[in-house]
Image (spheres, rainbow, N blue to C red):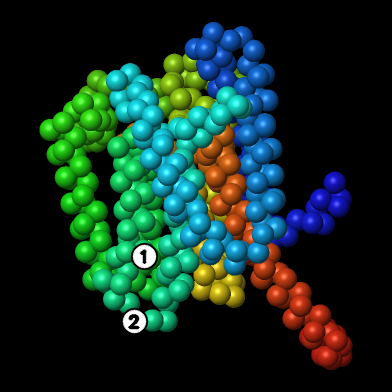
């Protein structure tokens, strides 16, 4: 174990935050598993605990392995992965899976291991790395809108177009994060306004086509619209049922909560271990538990900004912000949905909610951030060594 800690590089506080989130997740997931076990006709709730542990174990293994890879390699890997991601998204959407009549083609079945994988989460990380690579490449050049359409925006819109039919919230989140990243990368605002307008127009056209030909995307657009309408004016739908149960859970928690495992709303709240786990956390651990989680995510955001600021290259800075911001933003959306500040989206709470793909891709993103920070530590170590070799008395005087 001691040897393992010696091999851990990068920002130690980010490691600590990720570990705290993972450890904290076990009790809420295990508590909510009783509802999952009941719905599935299974009385063995411990199996869900073990499953969550295995997901986290694999996730942290991915994080450890990725943080050992020099981050400059991700430039080339993003170029290779974009076509692979596009193929995976096409295969996923062609499966034509429906749940209760709605298009839910989000998962691809992994052969031989009886597991499913949500390809849009992988596409999100790969696309952010790709955009960071391209923006760092043109950072000191005069940017022409025509020259950026094919290499930058074509992959972005292709990936978003393949995710949109089954998952509007993820599409909107990715598009927003791409816009933020290119803005931070120095992309002209006038060109960015054109892209945003094009994106809104494409969404409107998609909705009109889907309404005109409902058999192409059964009920999915209606689901989005009903969620937005019911969020604004109220109504008796499944989404409102979820929100009402979530608010009851939050109100029951008060300041200190009812205690670990003592939630009652987990028996009535759908997706209590994933989309609405924040409500269960507040019910069991109170406002204190909810604030503790918010502080951890804000702390993570702070460390992400610090790592980006200290990075020695433009690509490193944009890479950290590109894969780091979506983690915290997704957490804020999940919490906002639970307290009815945002329409129901289906976004999970990173490193807390159950679900393998979300955990793995979050750990992948954190591993990339740690790779950038470990490179900075390596450079500082070399600089310190060279300085000591050149003038030991200078180091001694600075220390004193």
Q: Local crowd at mark 2 within 10 Å, few (<14), some, or many (≥20)?
A: few
Q: Position of residue 212 (x, y in %)?
A: 12, 33
* Number of marks present in the image shown: 2
Residue for point 38% across, 81% down:
141
Residue 303's image quarter?
A: bottom right
Residue for point 64% across, 26% down:
51
The residue where tag 2 is placed is 142
Is 326 left or right of 312, judged from the image as shown?
A: left
The answer for how far apart the CA atoms under marks 1 and 2 are is 15 Å
Residue for point 50% across, 53% down:
81
Q: Is mark 2 on a helix, strand or loop?
A: loop
Q: Position of residue 381 (x, y in %)?
A: 76, 74
Q: Is residue 367 above or below residue 117?
A: below
- Residue 295: give its label: none
Q: Earlier in the sequence, mark 1 or mark 2?
A: 2
Residue for point 25% across, 61% down:
195
Q: Where is residue 357 in the image (x, y as percent from the top left)?
A: 53, 37
Front in this rendered view, residue 99 or 255: 99
Tell us which disc is closer to us: 1 or 2. Answer: 1
Residue 254 in view of the camera: no
Q: Where is residue 7 in the image (x, y as percent from the top left)?
A: 79, 56
Is 65 left or right of 86, judged from the image as shown?
A: right
Q: Local crowd at mark 1 within 10 Å, few (<14), some, or many (≥20)?
A: few
Residue 310 in view of the camera: yes
Q: In this view, does 243 lie above or below 128?
A: above
- Residue 151: give its label: 1
Front in this rendered view, residue 246 or 354: 354
Q: Quadrant of the C terminus?
A: bottom right
């Amino acid at each position: 174990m001691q040897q393992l800690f010696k091999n851990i590089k990068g920002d130690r506080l980010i490691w600590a935050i990720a570990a705290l989130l993972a450890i904290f997740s076990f009790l809420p997931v295990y508590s909510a598993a009783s509802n999952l076990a009941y719905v599935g006709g299974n009385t063995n709730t411990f199996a869900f605990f073990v499953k969550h542990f295995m997901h986290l174990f694999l996730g942290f293994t991915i994080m450890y392995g990725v943080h050992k890879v020099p981050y400059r390699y991700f430039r080339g890997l993003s170029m290779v992965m974009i076509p692979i991601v596009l193929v995976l998204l096409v295969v996923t959407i062609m499966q034509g899976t429906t749940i209760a009549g709605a298009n839910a083609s989000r998962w691809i079945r992994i052969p031989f291991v009886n597991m499913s994988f949500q390809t849009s989460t992988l596409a999100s990380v790969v696309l952010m790395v790709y955009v960071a690579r391209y923006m760092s490449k043109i950072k000191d050049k005069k940017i022409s809108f025509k020259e950026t359409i094919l290499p930058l925006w074509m992959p972005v819109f292709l990936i978003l177009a393949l995710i949109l039919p089954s998952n509007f919230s993820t599409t909107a989140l990715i598009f927003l994060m791409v816009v933020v990243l290119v803005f931070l990368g120095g992309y002209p605002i006038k060109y960015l306004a054109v892209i945003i307008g094009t994106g809104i127009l494409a969404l409107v056209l998609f909705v009109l086509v889907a309404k005109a030909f409902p058999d192409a995307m059964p009920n999915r657009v209606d689901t989005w619209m009903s969620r937005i309408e019911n969020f604004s004016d109220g109504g008796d739908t499944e989404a409102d049922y979820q929100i009402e149960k979530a608010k009851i859970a939050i109100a029951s928690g008060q300041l200190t909560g009812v205690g670990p495992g003592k939630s009652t709303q987990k028996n009535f709240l759908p997706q209590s271990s994933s989309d609405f786990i924040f409500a269960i956390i507040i019910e069991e651990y109170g406002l204190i538990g909810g604030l503790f989680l918010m502080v951890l995510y804000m702390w993570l955001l702070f460390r992400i900004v610090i790592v980006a600021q200290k990075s020695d290259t433009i690509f490193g800075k944009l890479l950290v912000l590109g894969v780091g911001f979506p983690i915290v933003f997704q957490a804020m959306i999940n919490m906002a949905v639970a307290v009815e500040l945002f329409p129901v989206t289906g976004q999970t709470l990173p490193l807390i909610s159950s679900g393998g793909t979300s955990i793995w891709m979050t750990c992948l993103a954190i591993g990339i951030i740690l790779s950038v920070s470990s490179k900075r530590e390596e450079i500082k170590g070399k600089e310190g060594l060279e300085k000591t070799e050149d003038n030991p008395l200078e180091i001694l005087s600075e220390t004193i």
